[in-house]
Amino acid sequence: MKKKLTRFDLQEMKDKGEKVVWMTAYDFITAQLAEESGMDMLLVGDSLGMAVYGYPGTVPVTMDQCIYHTEAVRRGAPNTFIIGDMPFGAYQTGVRQACRNAVRFHKEAAVDCIKLEGGVRVADVIRAISDGGMLVMGHIGLTPQSSGAQGGFRAQGRTAESARAIIEDARAVSEAGAFSVLVEGVPPEVTEAIMKEIPIPVYGIGAGLCDGQVMICSDILGLFQAFTPKFVKKYGNVAEEYRKVFSAYVDDVKQGRFPGREHTYKMIEGEAEKL
Ligand code: KIV
């Protein structure tokens, strides 16, 4: 049986230069298959707003939606380190609200840690949750919940001034007690500078090589159709497989080819004659 990683394993992997691989999952079946495939961690990201609910961004996602999906993922991957993603509105109105929602994630969905977006501006929240005995992963750089303030879903840290602010965010997150940090959508030079600056694991999405990588499940499957960010590598074209399967099923039913006799139940011997 697979052994679930702990924060100490993750730190040791960093220290030994062993990469950590993770992706998002939002449902039971995907979580089961991911655990079987040797995924180190799973994130039930608020990207479920786009990947599952069809919202234009992550802002409308609620705490309840995150909890429901995380519960399902936990059932599918009981031996995987699971990260619950704090949605927009779950930690913006104060430390007490943030701690209450972090506790909900642990009690209702059995997460191993929570992730939240922001650096310097959320340091007090990270400290309070960590002081409450819960693990926090920071998320800096491109932060989709504040894409309005960042001028859309666009790379961050491309000027020295903006890069310095992100490095400052990384320092604040680490000093506040986060056990790791996710860096999104920044040039690799910025990620390298962050790795020199802080001792905790640095994971990336669209941030070049670091201690580990996360990808959005529907992106690597080739399932998400709306757009493909530059940093995505598609490992399959599952959307095409879906289309093939769905249209073959439609054709079969319309043409009376399905269900066949082999897909039906047999009556108990002698009972059909009594009809
Ligand atoms: O919600 C999410 O899927 C994320 C990704 C950027 C990893 O935070």
Image: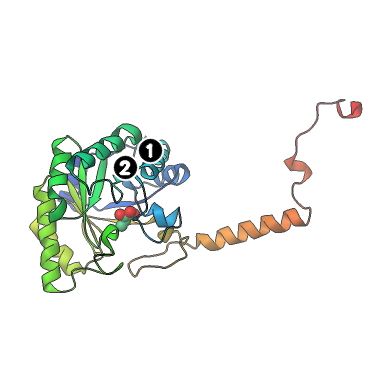
- Give the residue at the far front of this rendering: 93
User: Residue 139: where, in percent of width, then height?
Assistant: 22, 54
| Residue 7 can be seen in this image | yes
Name the residue at 9% across, 55% down.
171
Q: Identify which amino acid the numbered label 2 is placed on.
A: Ile
* Secondary structure of residue under mark 1: helix
* Residue receiving disc 1: 74
Name the amino acid, label 1. Answer: Arg
Question: Which residue reaches farthest bottom?
Answer: 159
Q: Is the C terminus in the top left, top right, bottom left or bottom right quadrant? A: top right
Q: Is residue 173 left or right of residue 183?
A: left
Residue 76 figure quarter: top left
Relative depth, front residue between 102 and 271: 102
In three-dimensional space, the C-alpha distance between marks 1 and 2, rounded to whole angstroms, equals: 7 Å
Residue 205 visible, this angle: no
Q: Which residue is mark 2?
A: 82
- Mark 2 Cα within 10 Å, few/some/many (few <14, many 20+)? many
Relative image position of residue 89 (x, y in whole percent) = 28, 49
Question: Dividing the picture into quarters, in which one does residue 36 lie?
Answer: top left
